[in-house]
Amino acid sequence: MDALEQHLARQAELSRDFFWNRLRWELVSSELGSECNCVVDVGAGPGFLGEFLRSRRPQVDYWFVEPIEDLERRLTEEFGEEANRRDRDFHGASHVTLMDVLEHQEDDRTFMAELAEKMEPGATLLLTVPAMPWLWSDWDAMLGHYRRYTKKGLRQVVDPLPLQIEEQSYIFPELIPPGLLRRARMRSGDADPADAEFPQLPKPLNETLYRVGKGTMKCRRVWPAGTSLYARLRRVG
């Protein structure tokens, strides 16, 4: 099992309440709108988004795509065979999520072209990726990242495709100082794979970071930088 699979398996056990995960799910939920009928979660991992939607938006159908076999099997048991959209189009789904997946694709342009082909015209894609190339560290390499993105870099990937960018915003600006600290600490090339895991934070600190993140998320359109980049795109044509 590589570092990414270990990371996702550990998330399945321990990270449901981690502030970073909760803030991303809430951002997605706030962007779905009343017209949302179905979400396809591409690179679903442990399926936390499906659990979140089931508790907060039970009227929304949850479909998934997950290439890691153990996780795919768990998701199929949890959400049903029909929800598994591997090698199937996304027709009937109003929204697609791609949450911290694109950075794992060596050829991100081809990956996005194939994803757009599966979407219906008018469907919305909600996407997050790690941001700011100057935050790159061994942590990224251990998790199988090929790159970190800027707004310009993401636009270059999607401009040739039938995907219209409706919003690009940097999120988690408050995590830039810890990101810089991590970069300085993990430059040696001999980092322990355990360093790739999310820290187990004391509950008061986790809640404080969640509340800070709620505030910065509301102001996301004004930040010039952040540790993640969020984008909302519309399938056209």
Image (cartoon, helix red, strand yellow):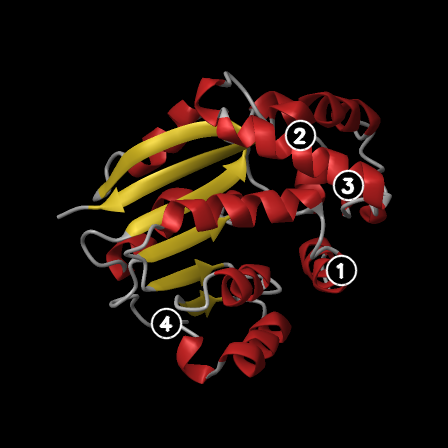
Please report whichever mark, 3 or 2, sits nearer to the chain's N-terminal start: 3
Q: Amino acid at mark 4?
A: Asp
Q: CA distance from mark 3 to mark 2?
A: 10 Å
Give the residue at x 61% y 71%: 71
Q: Residue at label 2?
A: 212
Q: Residue at label 3?
A: 206
Q: Residue at label 4?
A: 87
Local secondary structure at mark 3 = helix
Q: Amino acid at mark 2?
A: Val
Local packing at callout 2 (Cα closer than 10 Å; few below 14, some 14-19, many 20+) is: some
Q: CA distance from mark 4 to mark 2?
A: 40 Å
Give the residue at x 49% y 24%: 219
Q: Is residue 104 left or right of residue 179?
A: left
Query: Of residues 69 and 216, which is closer to you in this image?
Result: 216
Local secondary structure at mark 4 = loop
Please report whichever mark, 4 or 2, sits nearer to the chain's N-terminal start: 4
Provide residue 196's location: percent of width, then percent of height. 76, 45
Q: Residue at label 1?
A: 10
Query: Of residues 223 and 65, which is closer to you in this image?
Result: 223
Q: Is residue 25 left or right of residue 203?
A: left
Local packing at callout 3 (Cα closer than 10 Å; few below 14, some 14-19, many 20+) is: some
Asked if disc 1 and disc 2 are in contact, CB closer than 8 Å, the reply is: no
Q: Is residue 113 left or right of residue 75?
A: left
Q: CA distance from mark 1 to mark 2?
A: 25 Å
